[in-house]
Image: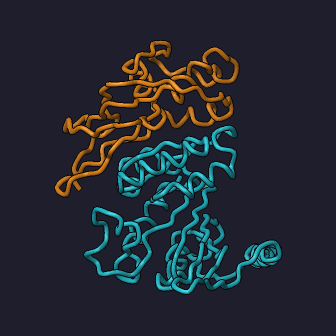
Chain colours: A cyan, B orange
Amino acid sequence: MEVGCGSGYVITSLMLMLGGEANGAQFIATDMNPHAITVTRETMEAHGVHAELINTDIASGLESRLAGSVDLLVVNPPYVPTPEDEVGREGIASAWAGGENGRSVIDKILPVADKLLSERGWLYMVTLTANNPSQICRQMTKKGYASRIVVQRSTEEESLHIIKFWRDVNIEVEANNGVTNSKAGILDSVRSQIQRLSFWGSSDINTSTD
Amino acid sequence: MRLLTHNMLSSNIKGVTNGFPLRIEVEKVVEKQVEINHDFLRNIFPKIDWKAFSDASRIMGYNELPEEPPEPSVLESDVEFLGKFHHALLELHLEEGALLCPETGRKFPVSKGIPNMLLLEDEV
């Protein structure tokens, strides 16, 4: 599922990567902007893929029936710090306007994501350094999510992180017991370090300036 | 809009307690074939509100589904049934029409297969 599909680039890429509906997956994309929905439909058609599209605010209308059902959620939110009154206006600015620290819409999306994600569900979200991604991760830890920055990239104008969130039973238990590490936790941490090293080996995550 | 999606949508209007299922008003139905996946059907079946789904399929012009939900064992062995389930769930699209809040009657338009669930300020 994608919240805020915009041009349709991400949901279309995701479907092409995952083999679309051929592997028995269902795809849904939402956007508040009806023009974005139209363009997304055209982008998908141009690439021979299909997702269900809904013109709505985040996941409004889907939340109660789809709760606990989404295995993969991707979000490229309006993350740019702007004045609060620019958030959610009609028109193209709603694609980037994120209010104070660029967090207005992100902070609305996260509880919805928590509701929609299945037990094994993953959330990938784009953030700016200005959004305070570490604080977002800490907030999500309290709800039982592990997190990891999977890609980091800087341009002249933006320093972007893609954060992956997933439910981790250990974390929730640790938070309740006030224990910050366990044997399982250490092994997981080592495992993720190794994964990170091999990921770095196979692609470039370094700064690029244009 | 597929009936799978319809089965996942409920009225998001403030104060509405009985927002599911949305009543379907049909203007245009389109059929689009898609490859059947038995595993998917078996996995999604427990999440489907069968009554809402079978009622909706009849409104869309398809009368092959039973009113009562099938026993899960039917999904294991009855290939013919799986075909009908698949067809109604994934191949029937409401292209033009509306979805109505069961409590308030408010219409959510469906255009080019896309439902518009955006609320007005006083409905949020």
Q: Residue at x 62, y 54 (%)?
A: A13
Q: Name the side, left or right, on which B9 lies relative to B40.
A: left
In terms of depth relative to the viewer, which is nearer, A176 or B107? B107
Residue B53 falls in image quadrant: top left
Residue A181 falls in image quadrant: bottom right
Q: Is residue B31 above or below residue A206?
A: above
Residue A183 in view (yes/no): no
In terms of depth relative to the viewer, which is nearer, A116 or A187? A116
Name the spot of residue A166 as percent of width and height, x first. Answer: 61, 65
Name the spot of residue A88 as percent of width and height, x first. Answer: 31, 66
Q: Residue at x 23, y 56 (%)?
A: B124
Q: Name the side, left or right, on which B106 lies relative to A21.
A: left
Which quadrant of the rendered structure holds the C terminus of chain A? bottom right
Q: Name the side, left or right, on which A183 lies relative to B86.
A: right
In terms of depth relative to the viewer, which is nearer, A55 or A26? A55
Q: Is residue B102 above or below residue A187?
A: above
Residue A93 in view (yes/no): yes
